[in-house]
Amino acid sequence: MKTISAVLLFILIACNSYGQQLEWEILNMGYSFGLAKDENGNTWSHDGVSGSLSFGSELRIKLLDNRLSPGLQFSFTPWNRYTPDGSSVCHQSALSYMALCDYNFLNVHSKIIPFAGVGIGISRVEYSDETISGPPTGTLSHLAFSPRVGIEYKRIRLALDYKYLGNRNNYFNFRVGFVIG
């Protein structure tokens, strides 16, 4: 823990000494949707309801007069897959770690900043034959890829991204986050 704190402190000091702005999206929460059926025909839709909540955090540095924002992203999305008849369920959760970069379109409006970006990294999907309380029965790791678009208004960021996590675990995600820094 001391090492992580020291690295974050070093990054903060380095950014301030070179006039760069460090920003941290402490928590972003979103709604994930559009997950494809798996190889057995199981889906995450049950009784007409589909989708899942997602949680994450991002750390970015604003460069080139705040136009470019490279950074790191962590996200967690759990979901349940149901058999076509709805009789059984298995739980899955995806952790993804990505290096990302956003381009901020600054000339659109003084307070509303649209952005477009892309992230690339690794995902780890855990599978459980039971609900969320059961232990994982398997894991898969894949290359993760995520194009995204969104807007930032004051310190609130709205984003729509597509998470490619491999093995039919790809989904869209609409996120809302609060930025400090």
Image: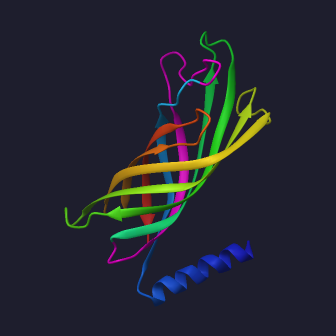
Q: Quadrant of residue 69?
A: bottom left
176 versus 166 height, above or below: below
Q: Which residues are magenta?
A: 38-66
Q: Main secondary structure of the magenta part?
A: loop
* Residue at screen point 49% across, 48% down: 29
* Residue at screen point 50% across, 37% down: 171
Residue 42: percent from left, percent from top? 61, 20
Whether residue 26 is in magenta: the answer is no
2 versus 101 height, above or below: below
Quadrant in the picture for the N terminus: bottom right
Q: Quadrant of residue 82?
A: top right
* Residue at screen point 66% across, 12% down: 87
The number of numbered discs placed on residues in the rendered structure image is: 0
Q: Name the one closer to the observer, 105 or 75.
A: 105
Quadrant in the picture for the C terminus: bottom left
- In the image, taking residue 25 as reference, residue 150 lies left or right, namely left
Asked which colour scheme the image uses, the reply is rainbow
Whether residue 58 is in magenta: the answer is yes
Residue 144: percent from left, percent from top? 57, 49
Residue 32: percent from left, percent from top? 49, 37
Q: Name the one closer to the observer, 152 or 172.
A: 172
- In the image, taking residue 179 as reference, residue 130 lies left or right, namely right
Residue 53: percent from left, percent from top? 53, 39
* Residue at screen point 63% across, 42% down: 94
- In the image, taking residue 26 as reference, residue 132 lies left or right, namely right
134 versus 118 height, above or below: above
- Judged from this view, the residue extending furthest toward the bottom is 17
